[in-house]
Amino acid sequence: MSNPRNPPPPPPPLPPYTGPGSPQDVPPLPGQSPIDPATLPKPIRDELQAPDPVAIDTSAAELKDGANRCPKCGATDIRHKTGSDLLVCLFCRNTWHGARVEEEFGLGTGLDELSGTVVASGAQAIDAGSSHLMSFKCSGCGAEVTVNTESQMTARCHWCRHVFGVNEQVANGAVPDAVLPFHIKKDDAVARIRQFVGKRQLFALKAFKEQFTPENVVPVYLPYMIVDGRVSADVSGQGEIETARYTRGSGDNKKTYYDADVYQVERHVDFTVDDLPLESSGARGNLDTRVNTNNIINAILPFDTKNAVKWNASYLNGVSSEKRDRDVEHLRPRLEDQLLSIARHQVEASVNRYDRGVRWEQERLDVHGTRWVSMYLPVWLYSYHEPGRNGGLLHYIAVNGRTGETMGSVPVQHWKLLLAALAVGTFLEGIALWILANQS
Amino acid sequence: MSEDGSLALLLLGPAGATGLYWFLYRHYRNTDKSHAFERETAVDAQPVTGSDRKIDEIKGTRETRIRGDNVHAYRTRVQRLPGNGNGKPDT
């Protein structure tokens, strides 16, 4: 209890700022500067006034974290209507459509003029200090509700059954710019997986076949960066054209010889790529087939990303998701590698005349501009864990949630496969020996 | 039949066994599959330009293709010359 005549001592003063850029500094508003740049020397002024990396703001002002209500009745129990891009209110059955990001943010246009690195607001760098746990105070009953954005983007209040979604683009990478809703329904996905495994029965692992229950397939939204780019590429190397072919020797010593002209070949190509998808989860981006089967999920790309709709957490109601943990700068080497591969594919037709092939020796890539948009893409995943050394191997069978493209890894019963191969080998060898025996 | 021919015939068994093993293994495990971004991405390319200069002639080689042919191996990286490489605006 404090005595009114002896007031408590004032709290100790806060430590002074530790200098410019310290975490205590309140960041200035965008475009605001404490010093008028016009008063600074020209080189510094030029540097200050140079354009920042352009960003497309895809945040949805109309949506907020927490309860988002049906525009007609105000209920929060909103779900995605599978097979369409519609959202449906489970209370009054009102349906409405999300805006396509392609038109909303002009992502399909301006590829020819792309310059610098344009990063949409949902694809910005992830702040290492940000938490993947987000808490809301339920506006219905006041209870505290937590959403773990590592795997979920919506949660239901245990007490009053309100549904909450994460819609604001915080710097933990959980909220993307856009989402591509599921079109393939569960029955369809199950049928596709059954068909895929049906033609891989003979040499499949016995335990896999016994435990095969495709009904356990789960819908997952996986994080991707969708990249547009404008680039130039140069390749150089040597190519050979056959000029003569002749045989020397006779009988058993007949050998074929070739004459060829050798050319120094150089090629240049300018091109734009539209909607190249890159995995923006570090774990999913590791495509080492010796230790995982992520290449299966990679193989069901591409998606019809042109139809992606503006982010709304209600699309993910009841569906799990994986959070993005890779930034633009992490993915740039992978993008450049893929762009070089595309360039080599583009110039292939121009070296058809080299009938003895071309050996490319040097390549060069100039990236003029890129545009990065983060998206959640829909995948049906069935998994089976094969026990073994180093923790075994997780086999995936994946169905593209839009196109239905199916790919999978079915574990193999090695002894059976080996036996079959040896049987066929022995049969062939028998034929070979019979031919040799009949000739001599 | 020549000695080479006999040897090739004798290798038929082991080659057939190995070939079948790999073919079936890949059919089940699909370790060779990935996104064919070279073909499946929408690419709008300007006409390819370049030059071809004859530098040599080869006489009497027994090799059927140029050594190190990588014209179809798009994903095999060769020596990378520095470009602007960073997506910064052209200056």
Image (cartoon, coloured by chain):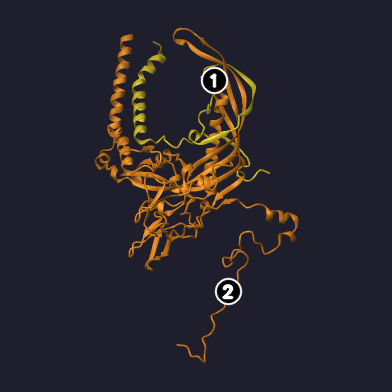
Chain colours: A orange, B yellow
Query: Residue reaching furthest bottom?
Result: A5
At label 1, counting other C-alpha atoms closer than 10 Å, the crowd grade (few under 14, some 14-19, many 20 or more) is: some
Mark 2: which amino acid? Pro
Between A194 and A266, the one nearer to me in the picture? A194
Q: Which residue is mark 1?
A: A355
- In the picture, residue B35 is in which quadrant? top left
Whichever of labels 2 and 1 marks the residue nearer the N terminus, that label is: 2
Mark 1: which amino acid? Asp
Between A411 and A150, the one nearer to me in the picture? A150
At label 2, counting other C-alpha atoms closer than 10 Å, the crowd grade (few under 14, some 14-19, many 20 or more) is: few
- The picture places residue A271, in percent across and down from the top left corner, at 58, 35
Compared across the picture, whether A302 is left or right of B58 comes to left
* Mark 1: secondary structure: loop
Report the quarter where the C terminus of chain A lies: top left
Any mark on residue B66, and which?
A: none
Between A115 and B13, the one nearer to me in the picture? A115
* Mark 2: secondary structure: loop
Between A338 and A439, the one nearer to me in the picture? A338
- Chain letter, disc 1 residue: A
Q: Which residue is mark 2?
A: A15
- Chain letter, disc 2 residue: A
- The picture places residue A219, in percent across and down from the top left corner, at 36, 47
